[in-house]
Image: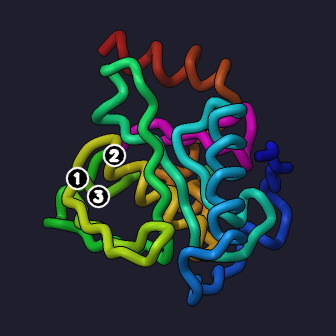
Amino acid sequence: MSILKISKIGHPILLKECSEIKEFSSDTLKKIVYDMSETMLDYNGIGLAAPQVHISKKIIVFRNPDNEEKDKIEITPLINPIFTPMGKETEDDWEGCLSIPGMQGLVRRFKKIKYSGFDLDGKEIENEVEGLHARVVQHEVDHLNGILYTSRLAHKNAFGFEKEITTYWKNEQNRK
Ligand code: ZN
């Protein structure tokens, strides 16, 4: 396994729609997923999409935030994923992205979604999730369509360096 180089905002691969995976169970696909998982853990990320490691294909990996308290890390790879919102309710929360290092933005996402995709062997995976789990999947699927969270800000000014966001936005919010 190897740790891959992360593409950063400004690189055109992050703005392109990725192509679908047609062949499952291949060694190539397995290697990409293992390398992406290792890269995500090394950077302490919660999710990673293939274009973030310069691969323009519909592959994401993410940690399951619902299971993290059990002291183990569970990584879900998802191939050709899609999601549909369940209801119109949205939530605003702070997000970061390994392709936009050191920055955070307040992003509006659907609260509940239904997602589907395939595992490494082409078996269909379906899930209904909400909260952080739903947020991570929406963020990563956006990457596959060439969309970064900076185009989904809840407010156009709610974006900046982590330190400034913590000082001027999060602390402000806590005081309310
Ligand atoms: Zn991202």
Under tag 3, what secondary structure?
strand
What kind of residue is marked 1? Val
Residue 118 percent across, percent down from the top left: 41, 73
Residue 65 is inside the magenta segment: no
* Label 1 sits on residue: 129
Query: For the C terminus, which image quadrant?
Result: top left
Residue 21 percent across, percent down from the top left: 58, 83
What kind of residue is marked 2? His
* Label 2 sits on residue: 133
Under tag 2, what secondary structure?
helix
* Side of 11 where 30 appears, left or right: left
- Residue at mark 2 to residue at mark 1: CA–CA distance: 6 Å
Residue 111 percent across, percent down from the top left: 24, 52
What kind of residue is marked 3? Phe
Ligand 1 neighbours mark 3 (CB distance < 8 Å): no
Q: Residue at x 65, y 52 (%)?
A: 34
* Label 3 sits on residue: 110
Residue 12, placed above or below residue 156 = below
Q: Residue at x 52, y 39 (%)?
A: 46
**What are the residue bounds of the magenta stretch?**
92-107
